[in-house]
Each structure stands twice: as structure tokens, then as C-alpha cells.
Image (tube, helix red, strand yellow):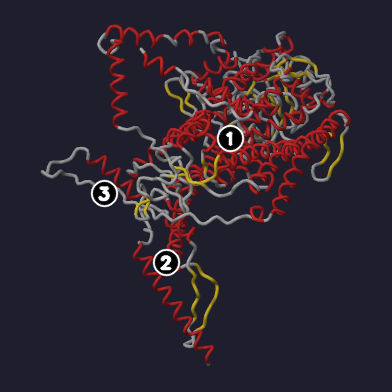
């Protein structure tokens, strides 16, 4: 380190008191002020003991950690003010482990601050740019290499190589093809169809129209969801076919997506938000507004499920329903538009 | 050739004098590592609290690697459905994926498992927070300027990767909240023109949710992104090391030196100790404060959602942007363009990250400043940059707050519609206002600095003269303060080029340089020059004179 032999003869690399590069005024370093531990041996010993105590307590914490891990029951819940109910084993091992680590850190920093030298030193920066000679040398080396390889002159080799390298990633992309199926018509179809019973979401019970009170709301799925054997397909279909059923006074229905798609004021809509696919869940009986909790898109179910607020651009698709001979709700047909979020090919 | 033989022969060495020396000799005999080690050990780093922000990010990353590795020992990223039969009673008998049931097992059946999970989650929150605040420090002090632009870009990439890593991580437990997040991500991918549905089908292995996404996210989360993060962090640090750290102005600090403490032993102890402090505090918080209680959310099912669902803080701004966007959608030639999704989820983030990454070049182009900078700017001394930074930060913060508009609505009993409309307007009104205000504040602070330099600081001692005049005694500021305040390189904006050259011929390139010069003049508008040496001297004389007068007055008073 050539600390004090700067070309300008100034310890800070300044000239006439000004920084050579930025031109700002350079002030000399301030004289070092000794700390208590630097001049008072008692203070130094005190600091030494403090550091050693922290390291010692850290070891103690590790021992307590092992004891807590073995002795504190894993299923014991305790109540602590502010924090609330918490697992005792989790708290005990977390606290001892955390303190053990923290004490090592605090000890080391205390050591550095109190006992290690605190006089700042100056180090020169080195140039972050090469000399002209070095640049010329590397340039000629590169040119020599390029010339020797013939990369520059043998055009046919160069072009065919570049062509081959350009095609080289193709297999890597093609090999990704079997990650999944092509979209096909999947996003347009649900398992709803004419005559499919509406069943409750959790218990899969058929729903009698007369059992739904005015203002009531039921989460439902198609009955044939149960017939799907593969679990994956069940989840996928549930993600599209889930609906909500609401009942309102027929006089309050302003419009519907099709003529007589309701049954005596009972309306069925897709539950999947047309914005980004969250299941809409908050229904306000009085206004007939359905709100998506993710981004607050709001749909008016008494008015064709049209968007009244929020980022969703499309109305909530309605499912035409009626009842079977025994009075259970069934679909008149499947949805006649894709449910869920928009996509490029949707049209 | 004899010369070659000579050069291969090892020089004669003295015998090591200690055991540690013997180890060093052993290694040096194989790597010739002595001079490198000497440079490493003697390396000087400047000291400032804000330089610890990057350290917090680095240490959080190490904590994430350690705890993440532990979690992989127990976590099973499978979507095979099982009936839960663990020790968390409320969910007994519930159907769920193996991913969720193994997360419950880590939380309730593995001793210390919950602690590790919570350390991992807290460390992820700290990591993203530290990366963000570190970025702000680097921005506002101008540390990104030449020669550090490349490291700035690496930092921007690290930020993007940190966000992706966080999102892929909290999606893994397959709980109701994270499943909802994935559903939204899938919806966003679907909206991409032309390829959206294909990308979504390939990523999820079919329709949402499918059963492929968890194992795929898992390998992305524990291998792909951390691998890239680790590589980029390594390069980031090597560059900091090689280019040497920037420093704040002060006595003895110049553009061509570094003033601070040596790596060994000071930073070995301080930075090493600080790692333990960050780790220890993270563990203590994880022990005391519950984070992401997935057992309360329950397993994911596509037909359910929790009200008031919130992503982790660092995704909040995206969620907020999606919430604020009006519901625009175009249908062209039978295709759908969902502006309501594309703009907030892809276009705005794309613009934000591109502008962020390119900022060093944008500023250098506008200012024409091609010099190296190792002395940091005090934010007030770069008012336009500081204004732009605060402006962007305001924009970002409004998006973050908008991400919680439902929480605000229910907490303050307000209409969600009005809040959303309010934020839509504020998003465009507040940032420019923040720019103007910040710039004015910076200029005000600069003027105060100049006042301090010329007239000293106000002592608070008021003197009443016999004439009835009041005089406040000013004392000159200390040398260290002076060094700090005077370290403001005066700048000159680019000059407007003439539209015609010397021969009166129209200069076709003028338009571009005019634009650039105008940008430069805007960037450096309202420059407040630092007092010149003459001004300083005159002010000092004036102050001395004033003090002398006051003293003579005092004498007069005491004589009477």
C-alpha cells in the first residue's frame, strides 16, 4: 500500500487543497480522539469482561436450547401477554437459539468498537481503466486470434456456424412441448349440461327450489362433478363450474342474460370472477351486488350480472336453470360463454 | 529453454514460524495466494450506517439458504390428495394436498419446524425489504454512477429475482391464500396476447390448478432462482470489492482514496458480528411473532377464498396496480386484449424495471457527466435526481396502499368505490407534487448549507446592543462539517448547440443535441453554487468584524 506517496505529494491525492478529479476542497483528516479503553486500562478490562460475558451467555443459551428441545413438551400451549397463545417448545427453543446467535453478534461488535483500533486509515484507489498500451495489446491479441482462427475471412464457416448456433436452442424449446396440453377448447367448456342437477358445494345435496328462502345464497357445483374419477380433473372442473345461486323477488330482476333463465326469482351465476379467476364470495342481499374479494370487481346479479365497479371487464356468466319433476334445480343447458378470466383467443 | 526452467522453479522460502504460518505456506505453495490474501486482509472499507443495508440483504439470503435447506428435508411438494391425520385437531379428516399436509407437519409435528418456517418467511420479508432500501440508498446517493452502472443493473436483476423467489416460495404450502395468488398469476399469464393460454397450459400442465404446478414451482424456488441469485450476488460482491466502496464526503476523503477501517480485524468482527445480529433478531422475531399461519387459512380449493386476502408486502404494489386499473378490454378481429390486466400486471412493471435498470445511463446522458464518482452525493445536492426518486417512490407507495384498499375500507368504514377512485386520481396527482416539493426542500437545504458555510451556525445567544439592536452570535462550523458541506462539485448544464454550423449550414444532428441540452438544463436547473473561496474569506472577515464589534459593545457595557 503506497499510502503516503501520492504523485501530487499530498497525502490525500489533492493539489492545492483541491481534489484532482472533482475539484472539491479537501480537508485534512481530523486528529484521532482516543476512547476510554485506549487510555484507561480499567475501562479496557471492563470492555473485555463485557465481551466475554456475552460470548459466555451465548454458550449458556445453547445449553438451555438443548434442554428446552428435550424437556419442554411439544404440544404445550402457553399464554403470554401481547403475544397471545403460543407453543411453549417453539417459544423456548426459538428464544434460546435467537439469543445465543444475537449474543455472539453483539459480543463481536462490542469487541470491535471498544477494543480494536478505531483510527481510520487511507487507501488509494487504483485506476479502473487500463493504459492505452494494455488496450492496444489486448486488441492485437484478439485480432491475431480472430485472424488465426479464420473466423473473419472464412465467411462460409462463420455463417454456417452462426446458423447452427442459432438453431441449437430449438430442441431445448421443443422439448418443453410435453409440459402440458394445448389449450384447445378447455377454457371454453365446463361440465354443465342440460338436465344436470345443481348440488351444494360442500355436501353435494340436490337443491329443492322451495327450500331456498328469499335473499338466500347457496354455493353449488354440478352433480356430475362427483362422477369424475381423477382427482386432478375434479379440481380443474371445480375451478370452472362452481356457481352461486341467489333468490330475489322476481320483481327486482332488472334483466337477465336469457329469457326465463331464472326459476321463480332463483338465479344461478358462475362464481369465478371474470377478471382474474378468484371465486367471488361477498354477496350483498339488499343491492344484489356480488363482490370479488381479490380486486373488488362488483357484479349486479339483478341486472344480468353486469359489472358495476372494479377492474373486471365482463359480466358474470349466467347459468340458465329450471326444476325437474320433483322440484330440484337443474341446468337448462351449459354456460353459453366461457367462464373465468379473459384470454387472447376468447374473442 | 533455461529461462523457462528457472521461472518454474519455486523461489527459496524461509521456514514458517508458527502453525498458522505453516497452513498459510501450504496453501501458498499451491495457489501463490500471499499477495491476494494481503490485499484482502488490508482492504479498507468506509464506515456508514447506510452501507449495512446491503449487508442485511446478503445475510438474510444466507439465512434463507440455511433454513430453506432444512425445510426441504420435511416438505413434500406434491398435490396428491390425502386425508389429514396430524396433530392439528381442527383440520383432522380434511382432504388436502401432500404439500399442505407436509407444511402442517412441519408446523406442528416437527420440533422446531414452525420456528424454521417462520425464520424462513421473516427472512424473506427482510430480504426483499433490505434489497429495496439498499436500492434507495444507492439511488439517492448517486452510487450507481460511473464506474458502477453494471453493478446497478445486476442489483435491479436481483430485485426482480427476489420478488419472483418470494412469490414462488409463499405459493408452495398450497394453502387457501397462496392458491388464490397462483390463480391470479395464472389469470395474468392467460391475458398475454397470442401465447398466453399456451404458456399457462404449459406452466400448469393443463388447466388451473392441475397437479403439476407445485413440483414445478418447487424446483424453480429451490434450484433455478436461488442458483441465479447466488451467482449474481457473487458477481455483485466481487464488483464492490474490486471497484472499492464509495464513501461519503468528509475530512480526508477524496475521489481517489478510501478512508475507513481494514477488513481484518475491524470488519471481520463488525460485519461478521452483524451477520449474527441479523440472524439472531430474525430468529427472535420468528419465535415471538406468528407469520403466515396457513393452518388458519386451510387447504386450497378453487371455489373458496378468504376475504381481505393480502399478498406478502413486496407483491402489494402489483396487486394495488391491478385493483386501480379501470376495466378496459378490447375485442379486435375476434381476439381479446385485456388492458385491465396487461397494463397493471405487465406494462407498468415492465416500464418501472426498465427505467430503473437504465437510470444510470439516462442520467449520464442528460447531464453529460462522464466522470468517475467515488464520493457520494448528499441527496440534497442532486435535487432533480432526489425529486425523481421521491416521485417514483410516491407512485410505488400509492400502489402498495391501494393493494390494501379493502382493508382501509373496512377499517375506516369507507366506501371501497370512493377509495379506489381517490387512489386513481392520487396516483397521477401526488407523484409530480412530490417531485416539486422534494426539489424545493433540497434547494432549501442547500441554501441553509451555504448559510452555515458563510455565516456559521446560530448559537442561540442573543445580544442586545445599546442602540436597541438585537444581534445573534454566529459561530463558525467545524472543519469536518465544512468538509462535508463543501464537497459539492459545481456543475454546468450542457449548452444549447447552434442549429447551424460555422458555415451557416443547418446541422441535422442539432435536434437531438438540443433535446439533450434542454434535458441537461432541466436536470441542473436552479443550481445553487457553493460559496467560492473569496466569498468564504469575505464572510469570515465579516463575521470576525461583527464579533469584534459585539465584544467591544460588551466591554462598553461592563465598563458602565
Q: Which numbered disc flags the more N-terminal residue, 3 or 1?
A: 1
Give the Cα separation between the discs numbered 1 and 2. 50 Å
Q: Which label is found at residue B319? A: 1
Give the Cα separation between the discs numbered 3 and 2. 30 Å
Whether labels 3 and 2 share one chain = yes
Circle nearer the viewer, 3 or 2? 2
Q: Is residue A316 visible?
A: no
Counting from the top left corner in percent of width and height, residue A244 is at 69, 26
Q: Is residue B56 visible?
A: yes
Quadrant hosting residue B144: top left
User: As displayed, is residue B260 above or below residue B114?
Assistant: below
Q: Which label is found at residue B495? A: 3
The furthest residue to the bottom: B560
Q: Chain of mark 3?
A: B
So how many labels did they put on this image? Answer: 3
Residue that appears at 62% across and 21% down: B222
B91 or A172, which is in the foreground? A172
The N terminus of chain B sits in image quarter:
top left
* Secondary structure type for disc 1: helix
User: As displayed, is residue B46 above or below residue B110?
Assistant: below
Q: Chain of mark 2?
A: B
Q: Which residue is disc 2 drawn over?
A: B454
Amino acid at each position: 500500500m503506497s499510502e503516503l506517496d501520492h504523485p501530487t505529494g499530498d497525502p490525500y491525492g489533492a493539489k492545492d487543497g483541491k481534489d484532482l478529479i472533482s475539484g472539491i476542497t479537501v480537508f485534512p483528516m481530523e486528529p484521532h480522539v482516543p476512547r476510554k479503553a485506549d487510555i484507561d486500562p480499567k475501562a479496557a478490562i471492563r470492555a473485555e469482561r463485557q465481551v466475554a460475558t456475552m460470548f459466555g451467555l451465548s454458550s449458556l443459551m445453547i445449553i438451555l436450547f438443548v434442554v428446552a428441545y428435550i424437556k419442554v413438551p411439544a404440544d404445550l400451549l402457553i399464554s403470554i401477554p401481547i403475544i397471545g397463545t403460543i407453543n411453549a417448545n417453539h417459544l423456548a427453543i426459538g428464544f434460546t437459539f435467537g439469543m445465543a446467535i444475537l449474543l455472539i453478534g453483539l459480543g463481536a461488535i462490542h469487541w470491535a468498537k471498544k477494543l480494536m483500533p478505531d483510527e481510520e486509515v487511507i487507501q488509494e484507489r487504483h485506476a479502473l481503466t487500463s493504459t492505452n498500451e494494455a488496450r492496444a495489446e489486448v486488441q492485437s491479441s484478439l485480432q491475431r486470434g480472430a485472424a488465426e482462427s479464420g473466423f473473419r475471412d472464412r465467411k462460409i464457416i462463420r455463417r454456417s456456424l452462426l446458423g447452427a448456433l442459432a438453431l441449437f436452442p430449438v430442441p431445448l424449446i421443443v422439448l418443453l412441448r410435453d409440459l402440458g396440453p394445448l389449450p384447445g377448447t378447455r377454457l371454453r367448456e365446463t361440465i354443465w349440461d342440460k338436465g344436470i342437477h345443481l348440488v351444494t358445494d360442500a355436501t353435494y345435496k340436490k337443491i329443492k327450489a322451495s327450500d331456498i328462502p328469499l335473499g338466500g345464497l347457496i354455493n353449488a357445483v354440478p352433480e356430475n362433478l362427483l362422477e369424475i374419477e381423477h382427482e386432478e380433473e375434479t379440481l380443474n372442473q371445480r375451478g370452472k363450474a362452481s356457481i352461486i345461486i341467489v333468490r330475489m323477488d322476481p320483481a327486482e330482476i332488472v334483466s337477465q342474460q336469457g329469457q326465463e333463465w331464472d326459476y321463480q326469482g332463483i338465479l344461478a351465476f358462475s362464481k369465478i370472477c371474470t377478471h382474474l379467476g378468484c371465486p367471488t364470495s361477498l354477496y350483498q342481499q339488499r343491492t344484489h351486488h356480488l363482490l370479488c374479494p381479490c380486486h373488488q370487481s362488483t357484479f349486479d346479479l339483478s341486472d344480468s350480472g353486469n359489472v358495476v365497479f372494479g377492474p373486471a371487464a365482463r359480466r358474470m356468466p349466467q347459468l340458465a336453470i329450471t326444476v325437474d319433476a320433483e322440484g330440484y334445480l337443474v341446468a337448462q343447458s351449459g354456460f353459453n360463454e366461457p367462464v373465468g378470466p379473459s384470454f387472447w383467443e376468447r374473442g | 529453454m533455461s529461462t523457462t526452467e528457472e521461472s518454474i522453479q519455486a523461489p527459496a522460502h524461509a521456514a514458517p514460524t508458527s502453525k498458522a504460518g505453516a497452513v498459510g505456506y501450504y496453501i501458498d505453495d499451491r495457489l501463490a495466494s500471499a499477495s491476494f490474501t494481503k490485499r484482502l486482509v488490508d482492504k479498507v472499507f468506509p464506515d456508514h450506517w447506510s452501507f449495512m443495508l446491503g449487508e442485511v440483504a446478503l445475510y438474510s439470503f444466507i439465512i434463507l439458504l440455511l433454513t430453506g435447506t432444512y425445510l426441504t428435508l420435511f416438505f413434500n411438494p406434491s398435490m396428491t390428495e390425502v386425508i389429514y391425520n396430524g396433530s392439528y385437531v381442527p383440520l383432522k379428516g380434511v382432504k388436502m394436498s401432500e404439500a399442505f399436509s407436509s407444511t402442517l407437519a412441519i408446523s406442528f409435528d416437527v420440533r422446531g419446524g414452525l420456528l424454521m418456517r417462520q425464520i424462513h418467511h421473516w427472512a424473506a420479508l427482510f430480504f426483499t425489504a433490505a434489497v429495496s432500501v439498499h436500492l434507495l440508498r444507492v439511488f439517492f446517493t448517486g452510487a450507481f454512477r460511473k464506474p458502477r452502472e453494471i453493478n446497478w443493473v445486476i442489483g435491479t436483476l436481483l430485485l426482480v429475482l427476489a420478488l419472483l423467489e418470494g412469490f414462488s416460495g409463499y405459493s408452495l404450502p398450497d394453502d387457501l391464500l397462496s392458491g388464490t395468488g397462483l390463480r391470479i398469476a395464472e389469470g395474468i399469464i392467460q391475458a398475454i396476447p397470442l401465447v398466453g393460454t399456451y404458456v399457462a397450459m404449459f406452466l400448469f400442465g393443463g388447466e388451473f390448478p392441475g397437479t403439476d404446478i407445485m413440483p414445478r414451482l418447487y424446483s424453480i424456488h429451490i434450484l433455478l432462482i436461488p442458483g441465479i441469485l447466488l451467482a449474481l450476488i457473487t458477481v455483485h460482491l466481487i464488483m464492490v470489492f474490486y471497484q472499492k466502496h464509495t464513501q461519503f464526503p468528509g475530512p480526508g476523503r477524496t475521489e481517489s482514496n478510501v478512508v475507513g477501517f481494514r477488513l481484518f480485524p475491524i470488519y471481520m468482527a463488525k460485519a461478521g458480528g452483524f451477520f449474527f445480529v441479523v440472524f439472531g433478531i430474525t430468529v427472535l422475531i420468528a419465535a415471538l411473532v406468528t407469520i403466515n399461519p396457513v393452518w388458519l387459512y386451510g387447504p386450497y380449493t378453487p371455489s373458496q377464498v378468504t376475504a381481505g386476502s393480502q399478498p406478502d408486502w413486496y407483491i402489494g404494489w402489483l396487486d394495488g396496480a391491478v385493483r386501480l386499473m379501470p376495466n378496459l378490454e378490447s375485442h379486435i378481429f375476434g381476439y381479446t386484449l385485456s388492458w385491465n390486466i396487461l397494463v397493471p400486471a405487465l406494462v407498468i412493471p415492465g416500464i418501472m424495471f426498465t427505467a430503473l435498470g437504465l437510470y444510470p445511463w439516462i442520467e449520464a446522458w442528460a447531464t453529460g457527466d462522464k466522470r468517475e464518482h467515488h464520493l457520494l452525493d448528499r441527496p440534497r445536492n442532486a435535487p432533480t435526481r432526489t425529486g425523481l426518486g421521491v416521485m417514483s417512490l410516491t407512485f410505488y407507495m400509492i400502489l402498495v396502499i391501494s393493494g390494501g384498499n379493502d382493508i382501509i375500507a373496512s377499517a375506516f368504514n369507507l366506501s371501497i368505490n370512493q377509495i379506489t377512485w381517490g387512489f386513481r386520481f392520487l396516483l397521477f396527482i401526488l407523484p409530480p407534487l412530490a417531485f416539486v416539493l422534494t426539489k424545493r426542500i433540497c434547494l432549501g437545504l442547500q441554501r441553509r448549507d451555504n448559510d452555515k458555510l458563510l455565516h456559521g451556525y446560530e448559537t442561540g445567544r442573543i445580544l442586545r446592543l445599546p442602540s436597541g439592536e438585537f444581534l445573534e452570535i454566529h459561530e463558525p462550523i467545524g472543519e469536518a462539517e465544512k468538509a462535508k458541506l463543501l464537497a459539492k462539485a459545481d456543475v454546468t448544464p450542457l449548452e444549447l448547440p447552434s442549429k447551424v454550423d460555422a458555415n451557416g449550414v443547418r446541422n441535422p444532428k442539432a435536434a437531438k443535441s438540443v433535446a439533450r441540452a434542454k434535458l441537461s438544463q432541466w436536470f441542473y436547473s436552479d443550481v445553487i453554487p457553493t460559496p467560492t473561496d473569496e466569498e468564504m474569506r469575505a464572510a469570515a472577515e465579516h463575521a470576525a468584524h461583527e464579533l469584534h464589534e459585539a465584544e467591544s459593545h460588551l466591554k462598553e457595557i461592563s465598563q458602565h
